Image (cartoon, rainbow, N blue to C red):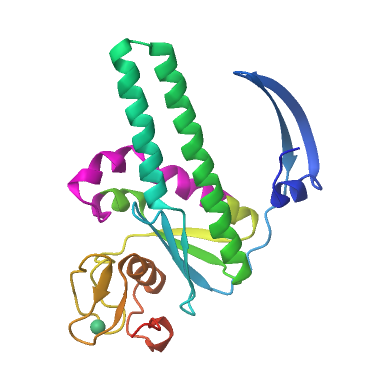
């Protein structure tokens, strides 16, 4: 079996029906498992998760512990590679082959979302998190910090699927997922409330000199939400 450890653990639960099907040249066995959701521990330990393109996901705990997930540059490279292949084939009108390549790309993306969501939920469990907070999905579309070059990517890349995976994997661990509608998560300084525009990948507050990686800022602000004027020592980077 090609199973990850967490999948093997699932096999200790009540097993349902087994279905075997053939997909292209591979045989696949799918087994239904009945698993109880763990009880939510209500400690209100909130973790903020910010989804984006350059960095697929950033998580920040209430202690300021931060983790980056996925590889935006690799995603871009792979997607460009498939696009090139499709274009090449398009000229020769090999429609069946084009479809095969599209399916392969879809599977690759889905697999990435599975891996990233698993890593995020594991990180949450390690840090005893009870609530994962994310931006509302409609919000992400409108505010994702992106250049025009990336816009096409934005519409095809499924933030929605990644969020749903985080939600269902989190629920199985007793972690609630809450969607919030915060504004200015990429501009507001979490230490003093001042609005600043980030430059390149760095965010620097003109008022209080708070500085951090720009993608981390979104996750910090989602984590904090309205309690912005907290003791700011825990979220300061070591670099300054
Ligand atoms: Zn500030």
Residue at point 76%, 51% (across, down)? 9
Expressed as whole percent of the image width and height from the top left, the position of residue 175 reads 58, 61
Expressed as whole percent of the image width and height from the top left, the position of residue 72 reads 38, 51
Expressed as whole percent of the image width and height from the top left, the position of residue 24 reads 59, 18
- Of residue 30 and residue 32, the one placed in the foreground of this image is 30
- Residue 153: image quadrant is top left
Residue at point 43%, 57% (across, down)? 57
In-image side of 21 versus 95 (left or right): right
In-image side of 217 versus 96 (left or right): left
* Secondary structure mostly seen in the magenta stretch: helix
Residue at point 38%, 31% (across, down)? 82
- Of residue 50 and residue 17, the one placed in the foreground of this image is 50
Locate the N terminus and report the quarter of the image it occupies: top right
Q: Is residue 182 above or below residue 76?
A: below
- Residue range corresponding to the magenta coloring: 142-168
- Of residue 171 and residue 232, the one placed in the foreground of this image is 232
Residue at point 18%, 86% (across, down)? 207
- Residue 157: image quadrant is top left
Question: Count the marks: how many?
Answer: 0
Q: Is residue 59 above or below residue 65?
A: above
- Residue 86: image quadrant is top left
Is residue 41 found inside the magenta-colored segment of the image?
no
In-image side of 232 versus 174 (left or right): left
Q: Is residue 89 above or below residue 178?
A: above
Q: Quadrant of ligand 1?
A: bottom left
In-image side of 151 versus 110 (left or right): left
Q: Is residue 33 above or below residue 101?
A: below
- Of residue 42 and residue 91, the one placed in the foreground of this image is 91
Is residue 166 found inside the magenta-colored segment of the image?
yes
Residue 167 showing in the rendered view: no
Expressed as whole percent of the image width and height from the top left, the position of residue 133 reads 45, 63
Residue 155 showing in the rendered view: yes
């Amino acid at each position: 079996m090609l199973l990850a450890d967490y999948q093997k653990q699932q096999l200790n639960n009540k097993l349902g029906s087994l279905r075997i099907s053939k997909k292209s040249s591979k045989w696949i066995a799918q087994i239904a498992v009945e698993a109880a959701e763990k009880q939510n521990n209500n400690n209100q330990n909130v973790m903020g998760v910010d989804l984006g393109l350059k960095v697929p996901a950033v998580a920040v705990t209430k202690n300021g512990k931060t983790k980056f997930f996925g590889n935006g540059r690799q995603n871009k490279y792979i997607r460009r590679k498939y696009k090139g292949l499709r274009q090449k084939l398009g000229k020769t009108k090999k429609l069946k082959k084009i479809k095969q390549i599209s399916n392969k790309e879809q599977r690759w993306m889905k697999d990435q979302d599975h891996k990233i969501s698993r890593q995020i939920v594991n990180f949450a469990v390690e840090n005893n998190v009870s609530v994962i907070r994310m931006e509302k999905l409609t919000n992400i579309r409108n505010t994702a910090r992106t250049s025009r070059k990336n816009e096409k990517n934005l519409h095809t890349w499924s933030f929605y699927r990644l969020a749903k995976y985080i939600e269902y994997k989190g629920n199985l661990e007793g972690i609630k997922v809450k969607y919030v509608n915060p504004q200015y998560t990429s501009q507001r300084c979490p230490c003093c409330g001042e609005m600043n525009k980030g430059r390149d990948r760095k965010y620097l507050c003109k008022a209080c000199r708070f500085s951090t990686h720009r993608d981390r800022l979104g996750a910090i602000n989602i984590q904090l939400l309205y309690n912005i004027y907290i003791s700011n020592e825990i979220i300061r980077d070591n670099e300054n």
